[in-house]
Amino acid sequence: MKRENLVVVSLSDFEPEIGRWIWCLEDVRRTLIKKVSDISQQQLDAKLNSHSHSIGSLLYHIALIEADWLYEEVLGGEWSTEIRSLFPQEDRNEDGMLSHVMGQSLDEHLHRLQCVRNELLFHFRSMDLEDWHESRKLPHYDVTPEWVIYHLLEHESHHRGQIFQMLSVLKRES
């Protein structure tokens, strides 16, 4: 049995402090993708009850929120047209629930997640510590890129847990 080495490392092409946070963000994504890599279309689209979300809807939401925080809070509001085109549906419906994203393949969801992550990595790779800690002044709050990454880690980890729980129920039922 191979012995694991459980450490956080800084990604080499980032400022070291930023690279450690990005490594954490990437680690959460790695475990999410590994867990969903073999799910069926039925599992991707299934809702456990009328008040729950599908795994596909949660994957869409994770990508959209990551893009939104990158473009709105970190970069000041100018979205890439390529990234914007990946989100034809609104995040939420009239009731405030996540929009039900149905019929998109796992490959489509993973492509969307990777495109957004590539954009985030591109922008954070060239960031220095001054910019990392610099507050962006927005109408309702001030926010640093450092806090944005913390929030995205927390957000994706939360939804990853929901997805893992849903998968355990769906696999038991099949």
Image (cartoon, rainbow, N blue to C red):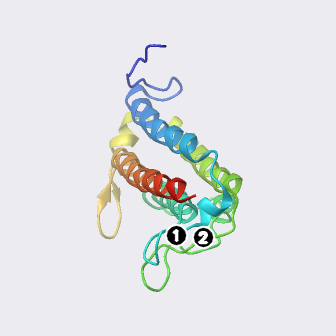
Question: Which residue corresponds to mark 1?
Answer: 47
How far across and how far down the image is residue 6, in percent?
A: 38, 22
Disc 2: CA contacts within 10 A as few (<14), some (14-19) or many (>=20): many
In this rendered view, identify the residue nearer to me: 64 or 41: 41
Q: Is residue 149 above or below residue 76?
A: above
Q: Quadrant of residue 37?
A: top right
Which residue: 54% across, 53% down?
171
Position of 124 compared to 158: left or right?
right
How far across and how far down the image is residue 170, in percent?
A: 52, 58
Secondary structure state at the residue bearing disc 2: loop
Work out which residue is located at the far bottom of the displayed protein and give it: 94
Asked if one can make out residue 68 in the rendered structure from this viewpoint, the answer is: yes
Q: Give residue 101's mark.
A: 2
Secondary structure state at the residue bearing disc 1: loop
How far across and how far down the image is residue 133, in percent?
A: 33, 42
In this rendered view, identify the residue nearer to me: 41 or 111: 41
Q: Is residue 107 above or below residue 18?
A: below
Front tag of 2 and 1: 1
How far across and how far down the image is residue 49, in percent?
A: 46, 74
Q: Is residue 162 above or below residue 50?
A: above
Position of 143 compared to 26: left or right?
left
Asked if one can make out residue 126 in the rendered structure from this viewpoint, the answer is: no
Q: Amino acid at mark 2?
A: Val
Which quadrant does the C terminus fall into? bottom right
